[in-house]
Amino acid sequence: MIGNQGNLPTYLTHQGRDAGLAKTVRARISLTGAKRIGGEETVDLGHLEGLASPDNLRVRRVTWVVKAEGESPSAVVQAVSEKGGRHARRITLDR
């Protein structure tokens, strides 16, 4: 699950979103000692609303299917937002 924990939406203003000036949030997986067998490497999540929004569109689910193959298999999942920055998490995979 990737979500926006800030008060403002990832597009900041409706004008920026509607004019196509605000880039959408993207999720990406990078693998070491494993291979992706399901899901795209990079997934466009669209825009995420903020806590101040009455809509409940702050979180998106992303799913990848991977197969551990090598020594110490791991995955790095990264979320990137033009306005909100980036966050990455390394996950150790079971063999």
Image (cartoon, grey):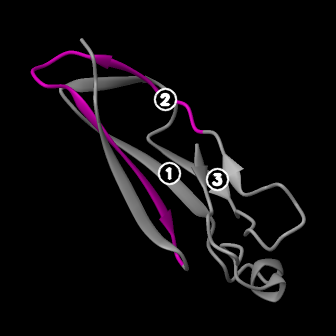
For residue 92: magenta?
Answer: no
Front in this rendered view, residue 48 or 41: 48
Lower sequence index among marks 3 and 1: 1
Q: Looking at the picture, does residue 40 appear above or below residue 5?
A: above
- What is the magenta range? 62-82
At 47% from the left and 64% from the top, the residue drawn is: 80
Residue 78: % across, % down: 40, 53
Residue 82 left/right relative to 57:
left
Task: Identify the residue position indicated by label 2 in the image.
Answer: 64
For residue 69: magenta?
Answer: yes
Q: CA distance from mark 2 to mark 1?
A: 11 Å
Task: Identify the residue position indicated by label 3 in the image.
Answer: 45
At 75% from the left and 66% from the top, the residue drawn is: 49
Residue 50 left/right relative to 54:
left
Q: Quadrant of residue 55?
A: bottom right
Q: Amino acid at mark 2?
A: Trp
Task: Identify the residue position indicated by label 1 in the image.
Answer: 27
Lower sequence index among marks 2 and 1: 1
Q: Amino acid at mark 1?
A: Ala
Q: Extreme top residue here?
A: 95
Q: Quadrant of residue 58?
A: bottom right
Residue 1: % across, % down: 58, 42
Q: Quadrant of residue 33?
A: top left
Q: Amino acid at mark 3?
A: Leu
Residue 20 left/right relative to 90:
right
Contact check, label 3 and label 1, Cβ < 8 Å: yes
Q: Element under label 2? A: loop
Q: Element under label 1? A: strand
Crowding at dot 2, Cα within 10 Å, few <14 / some 14-19 / many 20+, comes out as few
